Image (spheres, rainbow, N blue to C red):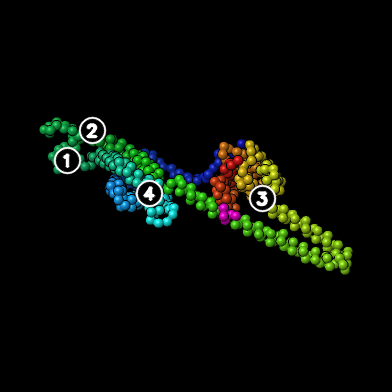
């Protein structure tokens, strides 16, 4: 295996986003009450109450009406209408979360109908887990909307009210005939506590300032719960995500297979086929020359024999590109060693596997390493390289290292980007760590299927 100096950082990395964080001289606790995020999330909490009431009233009213009419045929269509209304409310809620919480939740896919006709469509709507999750959201959001609205408004009002109390205390003696805001008092108005002394002013400012500082973090905590609710109940289901992913992967597999077929056809047409056509013509001429001039005919046959060897070698290379026989017969260790031997850079190969994976995964692993070593030969300028293959739980790990100039990336249009797409089509992952100046470390994960 490669040394620890060569393999730095985590074994697997799914991407790096090196964004430099701006440094603020003002502490975050003091900045928070004035940041745009706080005001967006406060606005979201204020809107929670009317949206929660709307959703709750719709769902409870329509579900009750639908349940009461289930003895008639009207109940089921009305229940479908209820679920459709819940989906519409969910669409509004996703838009509100996108604008104020900066939470981008994908739109759930349409309900898949098995069969045709009105009853089939209605049955699909009633059996859709996405529809019922939207209904559950409207029910759960009602008590939570009350809590978030009440807590946010109370903290905001008391915090800023007490913090600014010295500025508006004059209202009480002018308009209410009392010294200040009354905290408690007796019924006769003779005994109580009115905030009007300098000590009272200091106390109000201190308590109000603390509440102002606490309010943003309380709002952010409640907004985090809102994000969980929206993402968990209003987003696509895991099954929908998986179906979408498989459809995308199927497209990649089809495109890759079509490209491979075009490559094979081109190699046959431009290589072995053209050479065999020329060989047939040469043999025809040699046949005629054997009768007229046996020496010249024999020379032409000898030349044709050399062309046959070249054509056979081209066919072997083509067959190796489709699926090498050494991989089928002897496995990844021998096949990758053969690939490394053809590389222009000295390559060390280490394969540590308890068993052989299924042929499909084994083939993908072989062609992945082959393509990476071709890149090493053509572009890296490296003096040495290494290939490590091992198993970690249910994953087949591939690690290719070279000490070349670096600069490899997964940018769109690059060969590595296409390789990453092919790996993704089988639930694989490709990670590239190749800073300018090198070295280059590329790690690939494939599912282990023995």
Which residue is tagged 1? Answer: 172
Across and down, in percent, residue 211 comes to 30, 37
The first of marks 4 and 3 along the sequence is: 4
Please tell me whether residue 311 is drawn above or below residue 5 in the rendered image.
Answer: below
- Tell me which residue sits at (60%, 53%) in the image: 415
Provide the residue designation for mark 4.
126
SS for callout 3: loop
Q: What is the distance, in whole Å, between disc 3 and disc 1 at their CAs? A: 90 Å
Q: Secondary structure at mark 1?
A: helix
Q: Is residue 294 left or right of residue 253?
A: right
**Sequence-first disc among 2 and 4:** 4
Question: Label 2's element?
Answer: helix
Q: Magenta stretch: residue 361 in it?
A: no
Q: What percent of the width, then of the height, locates residue 254?
A: 57, 55
Of the residues tagged 2 and 3, which is closer to the observer? 3
Q: Which residue is mark 2?
A: 199
Q: Measured along the vertical axis of the image, is residue 301 above or below residue 75?
A: below
How far is disc 2 from disc 4 in space, using C-alphas?
64 Å
Which residue does the numbered mark 3 point to in the structure image?
323
For the residues labelled 2 and 3, the Cα–Cα distance comes to 87 Å
Seen from the viewer's position, the closer of residues 121 and 364 is 121
Between label 3 and label 1, give the one nearer the viewer: 3
Q: Magenta part of the protein: which range?
A: 253-257
Chain-order first, disc 3 or disc 1: 1
Packing grade of label 4 (10 A; few <14, some 14-19, many >=20) is some
């Amino acid at each position: 295996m490669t040394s620890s100096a060569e393999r730095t950082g985590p074994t697997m990395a799914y991407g790096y986003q090196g964004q430099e964080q701006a440094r603020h001289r003002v502490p975050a606790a003091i900045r928070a009450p004035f940041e745009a995020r706080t005001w967006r999330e406060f606005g979201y909490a204020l809107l929670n109450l009317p949206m929660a009431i709307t959703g709750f009233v719709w769902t409870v009213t329509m579900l009750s009406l639908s349940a009461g009419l289930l003895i008639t045929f009207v109940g089921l269509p009305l229940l479908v209408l209820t679920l459709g209304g819940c989906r519409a409310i969910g669409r509004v809620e996703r838009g509100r979360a996108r604008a104020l919480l900066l939470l981008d939740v994908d739109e759930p896919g349409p309900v898949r109908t098995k069969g045709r006709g009105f009853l089939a469509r209605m049955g699909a709507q009633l059996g859709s887990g996405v529809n019922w999750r939207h209904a559950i959201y409207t029910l759960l959001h009602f008590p939570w909307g009350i809590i978030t609205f009440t807590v946010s408004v109370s903290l905001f009002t008391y915090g800023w009210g007490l913090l600014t109390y010295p500025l508006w205390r004059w209202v009480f003696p002018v308009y209410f005939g009392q010294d200040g805001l009354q905290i408690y008092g007796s019924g006769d108005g003779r005994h109580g506590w009115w905030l009007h002394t300098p000590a009272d002013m200091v106390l109000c400012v201190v308590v109000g300032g603390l509440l102002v500082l606490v309010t943003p973090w309380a709002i952010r905590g409640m907004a985090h719960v809102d994000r969980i609710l929206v993402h968990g109940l209003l987003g696509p289901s895991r099954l929908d995500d998986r179906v979408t992913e498989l459809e995308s992967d199927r497209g990649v597999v089809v495109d890759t297979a079509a490209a491979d077929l075009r490559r094979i056809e081109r190699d046959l047409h431009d290589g072995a086929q053209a050479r065999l056509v020329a060989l047939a013509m040469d043999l025809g001429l040699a046949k005629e020359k054997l009768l007229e001039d046996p020496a010249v005919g024999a020379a032409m046959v000898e030349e044709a024999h050399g062309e046959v060897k070249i054509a056979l070698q081209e066919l072997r290379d083509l067959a190796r590109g489709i699926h090498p026989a050494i991989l089928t017969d002897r496995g990844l260790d021998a096949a990758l060693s053969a690939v490394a031997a053809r590389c222009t850079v000295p390559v060390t190969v280490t394969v540590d596997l308890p068993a052989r994976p299924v042929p499909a995964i084994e083939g993908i692993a072989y062609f992945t390493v082959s393509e990476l070593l071709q890149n090493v030969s053509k572009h890296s300028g490296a003096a040495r390289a290494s290939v490590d293959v091992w198993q970690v739980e249910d994953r087949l790990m591939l690690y290719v290292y070279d000490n070349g100039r670096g600069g490899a990336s997964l940018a769109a249009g690059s060969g590595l980007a296409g390789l990453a797409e092919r790996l993704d089509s089988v639930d694989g992952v490709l990670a590239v760590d190749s800073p300018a100046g090198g070295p280059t470390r590329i790690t690939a994960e494939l599912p282990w299927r023995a």
